[in-house]
Image (cartoon, rainbow, N blue to C red):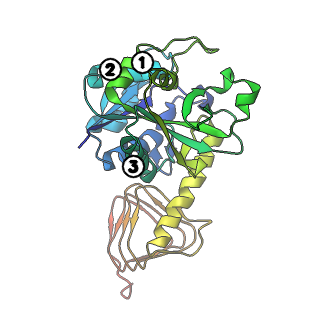
């Protein structure tokens, strides 16, 4: 079986966040954005995950611990330069490498798995995760030839008027043949309006050398949304919050008022449990089956046994033993 590696780009300062906290550590539904990414990659059993760090790297390392290895980007010279920082760990290895930014918490495991599968089935040197959107502003455009094959990616600041009208865009998530990736990175130049080393330039380099370039598209544009400021952070929080509520309801949990329920990403809830209005479940909270939680409950890292009822209550790090019927 082909080995799979991942490079997570998490070195940026994120100045538009206007925060002392590194951008990728801002939480979405109770978990830092970069943790969302590395948890998904771990669940998909990647052989090695390299996180490229830079700004306040100690804080990112403290969050992720030894679940990943690290590469340091001291200067912010572009995405291709960031990936190149993982050369020491990965350059000589055979396999497939996924590149993903640490500020895309909405991408799903299923989409990443499909991207990997598509890349391997097409025997491609590079595969781009693309999206079709009515508002492509801010995204790199996918340039195809008359046969529909991907030729290159052009960044918005470098695009012509005709290219700006293209609706198929780059999500910023790629798969590459690992050795070809690191060979091609040596050939990337800064001949662009930003004078940066762009990772998408690797696509054109590989294409010009006669290699296969493929694209796997996601129908859900939200999956590719990056977070660059507080407004986008709030938007991502709302989208993921709704996904979490939908997940629990589809798995047998009654949520009587989804507009006031707040359930974080790592919370687990058993079947036939009812979540009443104004309930907040945070951290690693575990709720058993056939429970009634709420109204007006806030639990953090809390464990409730089966058939437990809790209302008008707030507690952290304890075990509730109030079975329904014996209140």
> For this view, does 297 lie left or right of residue 61?
right
Q: Nearer the viewer, residue 308 or 199?
A: 199
Residue 251, x across and y down, in percent: 43, 72
When asked about the image quadrant of residue 60, the answer is: top left
> For this view, does 301 lie left or right of residue 227?
left
**Residue that appears at 69% across and 36% down:** 166
- Label 2 Cα neighbours within 10 Å, binned few <14 / some 14-19 / many ≥20: some
**Residue that appears at 55% across and 41% down:** 130
* Residue lying at the far left of the rendered structure: 1
Q: Nearer the viewer, residue 213 or 141?
A: 213
Check contact, mark 2 vs mark 3: CB within 8 A. Answer: no
**Which residue, given by chain and number where applicable, does mark 1 sit on?**
185
Residue 277, x across and y down, in percent: 57, 71
**Which residue, given by chain and number where applicable, does mark 2 sit on?**
87
Residue 47 appearing in the image: yes
Residue 278, x across and y down, in percent: 57, 67
**Which residue, given by chain and number where applicable, does mark 3 sit on?**
113
SS label for mark 1: helix
SS label for mark 3: helix
The answer for how far apart the CA atoms under marks 2 and 3 are is 24 Å
- Label 1 Cα neighbours within 10 Å, binned few <14 / some 14-19 / many ≥20: many
Residue 101 appearing in the image: no
The answer for how far apart the CA atoms under marks 1 and 3 are is 25 Å
N-term-proximal mark, 1 vs 3: 3
Check contact, mark 1 vs mark 2: CB within 8 A. Answer: yes
Give the position of the C terminus as an image quadrant: bottom left
Which numbered circle lies on residue 82? none
Which label lies toward us, 1 or 2? 1
N-term-proximal mark, 1 vs 2: 2
Q: In this rendering, is residue 140 above or below 109? A: above
Q: Nearer the viewer, residue 45 or 128?
A: 128
The answer for how far apart the CA atoms under marks 1 and 2 are is 10 Å
């Amino acid at each position: 079986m082909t080995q799979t590696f991942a490079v997570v780009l998490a070195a940026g300062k994120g100045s538009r966040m206007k925060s002392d906290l590194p951008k990728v550590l801002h939480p979405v539904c109770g978990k830092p954005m970069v943790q969302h990414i590395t948890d998904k990659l771990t669940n998909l059993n990647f052989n090695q995950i390299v996180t490229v760090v830079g700004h306040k790297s100690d804080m990112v390392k403290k969050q992720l611990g030894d679940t990943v290895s690290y590469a340091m980007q001291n200067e912010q010279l572009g995405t291709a330069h960031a990936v190149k920082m993982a050369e020491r760990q990965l350059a000589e290895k055979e396999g497939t490498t996924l590149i993903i930014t640490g500020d895309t918490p909405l991408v799903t495991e299923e989409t990443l798995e499909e991207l990997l599968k598509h890349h391997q089935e097409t025997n491609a040197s590079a595969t781009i995760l693309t999206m079709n959107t009515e508002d492509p502003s801010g995204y790199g455009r996918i340039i195809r030839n008359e046969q529909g094959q991907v030729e290159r990616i052009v960044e918005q600041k470098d695009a012509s008027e005709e290219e700006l009208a293209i609706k198929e865009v780059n999500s910023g998530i790629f798969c590459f043949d690992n050795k070809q990736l690191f060979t091609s990175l040596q050939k990337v130049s800064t001949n662009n309006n930003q004078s940066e080393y762009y990772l998408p330039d690797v696509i054109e380099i590989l294409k010009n050398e006669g290699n296969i370039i493929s694209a796997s598209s996601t129908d859900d544009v939200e999956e590719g949304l990056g977070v660059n400021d507080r407004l986008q952070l709030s938007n991502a929080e709302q989208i993921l919050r709704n996904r979490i509520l939908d997940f629990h309801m589809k798995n047998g949990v009654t949520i009587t008022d989804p507009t006031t329920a707040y359930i974080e990403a790592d919370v687990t809830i058993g079947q036939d449990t009812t979540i009443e209005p104004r309930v907040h479940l945070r951290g690693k909270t575990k709720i058993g089956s056939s429970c009634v939680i709420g109204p007006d409950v806030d639990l953090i890292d809390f464990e409730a046994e089966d058939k437990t009822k809790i209302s008008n209550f707030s507690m952290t790090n304890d075990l509730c033993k109030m079975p329904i019927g014996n209140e």
